[in-house]
Amino acid sequence: MESWRRNPLVFWMVGLPPTAWLLLFFLLPLGLIWILSFAELRGLLDMEVTGTLDNYARALDPLYLQIFAKSFLFAAITTVVSLVFGFPVALAIVFAPPRWRALLLLLVILPFWTNLLIRTYALIAVLRTRGFVNFTLEWLWDQGNTVLALLGLGSYQLLGERFEPLELLYNNTAVVIGLVYVHLPFMVLPLYASLEKLDRSLIEAALDLGASQVRAMRTIVVPLALPGIVSGSILVFIPALGSFLTPDLLGGTDSQMIANVIERQFKSANDWPFGAALSFLLMYLTFAALALRALYGRRAARRGAA
């Protein structure tokens, strides 16, 4: 701190550019949108800031509350599924030989090297009616019928029908699959960072004292990995809550999330005040999640100090 005080010019040269950038390209546009949330439409393109709360009151309509609830549900399911699949992956990377860890971490972050739009279209190619999943299931179906015929059980062919492709696209399931596909690395990386600090001697001691592997995992590994679980859950939940592209491309008419509604208000409906109100309600919810994370971190620090 004293070195900065002795060299104030260096401090301003280093701190001023990012501060100006943050002010001009983040806080100022955000403030303008916040002001618009208190405006009223006076015509097709005219808006007047009157300080009205009608836009927020309209956002509390049961129709939009239902979409908010669906968005929360999708984000929560995405977080849970990402945790279920991401925890074993992070654990496997931690316990992998040192020469393999860098490669495994590279495989985790490799999707970030490809544009999200391209990855989503690739997922469409996998899930569509004539996609890779249905092709694989159809091949297994045909092979099963062939085996039954060779065993002289042709009359017991699988349901006696041709394979019917599964409808895996343009529904809620496709949206959740897409969200997990996009956000899974955000769960794996914090978990890995937390598990990497794990003292393996604690696990060995628990096993030596008669604990089963499941109990050692539940009583030793999971509690010590809790900071990574909380951080990963927030990193997955918040972006998934505001996801726009994935439900737009993979979801059907009943699978739209709140971000899709906001996009339509700014583009199709040309109702910027209402779109701004919806945006800030979503932001308020995000701040609430971050506040809960900070509260948890403070309590954890106090317990650690005690």
Image: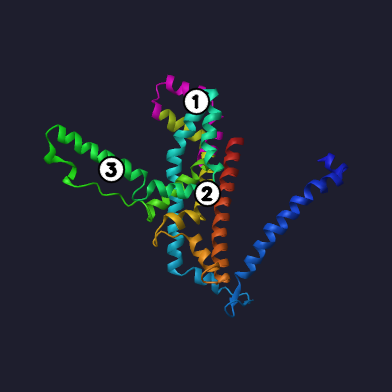
Q: Residue furthest bottom?
A: 42
- Name the front one of labels 3 and 1: 3
Magenta region includes residue 56: no
Tell me if mark 1 has few (under 14), some (14-19) or many (20+) residues whose alpha carbon lies within 10 angstroms of its own: few
Q: Quadrant of residue 256?
A: bottom left
Provide the residue designation for mark 2: 116
Q: Which residue does the image show at 56% across and 47% down from the upper left? A: 293
Q: Main secondary structure of the magenta part?
A: helix
Give the residue type that dot 1 points to: Ala
Q: Is residue 306 visible?
A: no
Secondary element at tag 1:
loop
* Quarter placement of the C terminus: top right
Residue at 51% x, 38% y: name it: 188
For badge 3, the amino acid type reads Glu
User: Pointer 3: what residue?
Assistant: 138
- Per the image, the residue denoted by label 1 is 96
Q: Which of marks 3 and 2 precedes in the sequence?
A: 2
- The residues bearing labels 3 and 1 have C-alpha atoms spaced at a distance of 36 Å
The quadrant in which residue 24 appears is: bottom right
Label 2 to label 1, Cα distance in Å? 29 Å
Q: Quadrant of the N terminus?
A: top right
| Magenta-colored span | 187-214
x and y percentages locating residue 274 in the rendered image: 55, 70
